[in-house]
Amino acid sequence: MLVSQFTQVLISRGEYICRFGETGSDMFFIFAGIVDVLLPAENTINTFPLALTTPGNQVSVQRRGSHRVGPTTNDITSKNPLQKPGIQYSKVNELKDGDYFGENGLFTNGIRNACVQAQTSCILYKLSRESMELVFARYPAWKEKVFRIASIHREKYRLLQKIREEQRRGLATSLGLVLSRADLMNERAEQLKEEMDRTHTTRKYGMWTSMVLPPLVTLLITALVKPFSMVLRNLICGVPAQSPFHIFWLRFMVFCTVYIAIITPYQLAIDSMDRLTIYITILHFITLICEVAFIVDLWFSGHVLESNATLELYGQRIRSVYKKDRITYDFIAAIPFYGLLAAFNCSSRLKLLRCIKLLNVAGYLDELSRAKVASELTRFGHIWLLFLLVMYWGACAYLSVAMEIGFGTEWESWLPSKTLEISDPQSPSSSQLTRRLLRGFFFAITVFIKKARNIAPDIASAYAFQIAISFIGLLTMSFVIGELTSLFISRSSLEIGFRKNHIAVTTYLERARVSDKINSRTRAYMSTLWASHAGVNYDKVLADMPREIRSKCILHASKIPLNWFIMKVITPIGGVANTDMEVFTVSLAEHLHFEAYSLNEEVITEGTIVRAMYFVTKGFLYMKSSSLLDQPIGLRDGSYFGERGLLGCTISAYTVRTVRACDIFSLNSKAFAHVLEKHEFSRLAIDICNNTYKALKRKCLANCTKTEMEEYWGAALLDTIHDFHIRNISPPTPGGEGSAEETKRQPSKRDERYFNVGSPNTVSDEETPAISAIFECLNTSQSCFEAFAPLLYIILPNNPLDASVGFNQTLTL
């Protein structure tokens, strides 16, 4: 019953689960992932003793703070430490899958005594106090037992902390953990000397290189030596898992493994390749590179760098898995047994030991597709690659047996004909080699697929080989059929679920007796949903994701239209750093919602209130207007629309209809206003637009043309920016009671700054750098209007250049 009360929680990397000083009554069990237990640096420092050196070179230990475990009275009464600027945290513990935390909040009314942050993406199970009380109410005897055990554990923990503290204090007293000032100065001086020597050597080498080496040698070093040194450094020092070089090395090892698995049986069964030709020399050179790569791979695979991201991706330690599962096969494949034993006239079949690395090729293929969503087609290709390799080995094994037993006298026999026997290995004909390979594949098809003529052998040893290879072929074919079946089942499961919903919708429409138009639109939407998205509701899938992962997915899908919108509306204002722009873009992506439209559907209808704007990622639409446009305007991938009057609750003057099926991300007006209020530079831009609108509203501009309105808007915007800048650089008010009273008389809410025309606006400390940058970028009335015009069209309910209707309403933003 207790387990049934658990609630699954998905936590993304870097997210806080518990915060120091907050109240909470939930207990968490870690199913997968790693979390860090953090404490404020000042709290951890106060917990440990401090060893000080006295003038007599004696070490005295002084306590820094209380010996109590957990937050002190000051911690409880102070603000949340996570809100304090510049606070430092130190990691005191690490919890993995199978651990739990938060039990103090479950059994007591205390506050959290540490921060718990997800080091990787985690799957947690949460147990609330209400759920625990439900279980206690049903099992009162178990309740007493649990509380008794919890009390014992708390007492044990308190005693253990006390013992550790005493041991730490004694260790500090006996060893003197604090270095003297002279030791610190000497260590710093040695570091400075080493750094100066290294800098001097580097300068001497740089002068010699620039004065002595000719430009051709320098170019050669740049083109060859530097890339080679970088590759060598990566191989020796190791690289992080799933890094670009690691992916390249995995692909290279797949090529080397498959190449050795093909060329070695070919040499043993078809062509020994003992002659000296250009083609054979190239193949031998590639073989040598692959053999060296096998040796290097032993070192490289054992020194792959691990991190939190790799642990989250793999779920376990990479090195331990490699040493447990793959290192044996790599070690056998790396040892050149045939080359070492060639002096003893050993059999050339020892070369087959290099092919044992083929057992690891499935692991390489899995690692290549681990960091991406592998499609069914990729998995299908991997299965067929391995299946063809096994068939090729069966063909080579058949030819090797024929070379041992002897060739047959005719084609219609189990053994190949004598015409396929190579009499002169130094000059075999290409037609003879081709027919020999095809004869081997004919046998392999007979054994594995069972769809060719099966001729009975004449020799007992041939019978034994036939039985063994047929059994291997049966197992291989069964494995391939099972893997392909699972792929088709995973593919068809989506279709089955969608078809069930389709039948349910169709049955409901027939029972409800809706109009033919709604019926046809519904059927068209269902058909489009299957044809475009295989029946998957992506908005629901995105809603179930953690916030950070969802934002990154939406940002990746809507990157082109969203960046185009930012470049057209926000970037011209100026005064925005690249990092702030990226944060603003991510904030917009957090509020986007996916919508799919079928053919001939209206996204926006003329005459309705504008409630959202849209970003097109796939499809084609056209925009028409009965009053503003003579011909429709086409909208395709990367476009956006619906921004006119979005924040002014205006009436749409356009109708936007789909020409073909479209994928669109929508942003409603409330979410957009929230994002604008969230960031300093956008909030400042809104302030400038509002103050400019109020200034122009007090003037009589009813009979102005569009050109004159542009000039009025530009001049008013320039004056507003100038006023903001003047207030920013004006000297501060002297301190004292007078300034305090003036501060109290200022509006406490930001909305009063917006809508109270009589009160002057002030620039906050966060907006100060932005207004200075805007003042430097926009120094003319024309540039001001061009920069703020896109934002004005979004904020104002009407056209800002139409003087007859532009100032008849009050802004509601």
Image (tube, grey):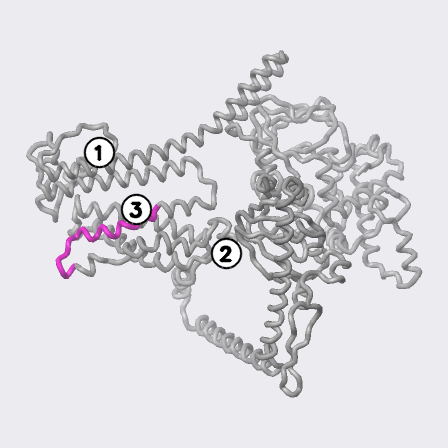
Question: Does residue 358 show up magenta in the picture?
Answer: yes
Report, in whole angstroms, how far the alpha carbon at label 2 lies from the one at label 1.
47 Å
Q: Can residue 578 be seen in this view?
A: no
Which corner quadrant of the image does residue 803 belong to? Answer: top right
| Local secondary structure at mark 3 | helix
| Local secondary structure at mark 2 | loop
Which corner quadrant of the image does residue 709 belong to? Answer: top right
**Magenta segment range?**
342-361
Report, in whole angstroms, how far the alpha carbon at label 1 lies from the one at label 3.
22 Å
Which corner quadrant of the image does residue 654 belong to? Answer: top right
Q: Is residue 232 above or below residue 106?
A: below
Check whether the beta carbons of the residues at disc 3 and disc 2 lie within 8 A of each other.
no
Res. 238 mark: none
| Local secondary structure at mark 1 | helix
Residue at 66% over, 67% down: 47
Q: How crowded is mark 1: few (under 14 residues within 10 Å), some or many (20 or more)?
A: many
Image coordinates for residue 236, horizontal then vertical, percent: 40, 62
* Residue at the left extreme of this rendering: 409
Res. 447 mark: 1
Res. 307 mark: 2
Q: How crowded is mark 2: few (under 14 residues within 10 Å), some or many (20 or more)?
A: few
Report which residue position mark 3 lands on: 258
Question: In the figure, is residue 334 to the left or right of 680?
Answer: left
Question: In the figure, is residue 153 to the left or right of 421?
Answer: right
Amino acid on which the number 3 mark rests in the picture: Val
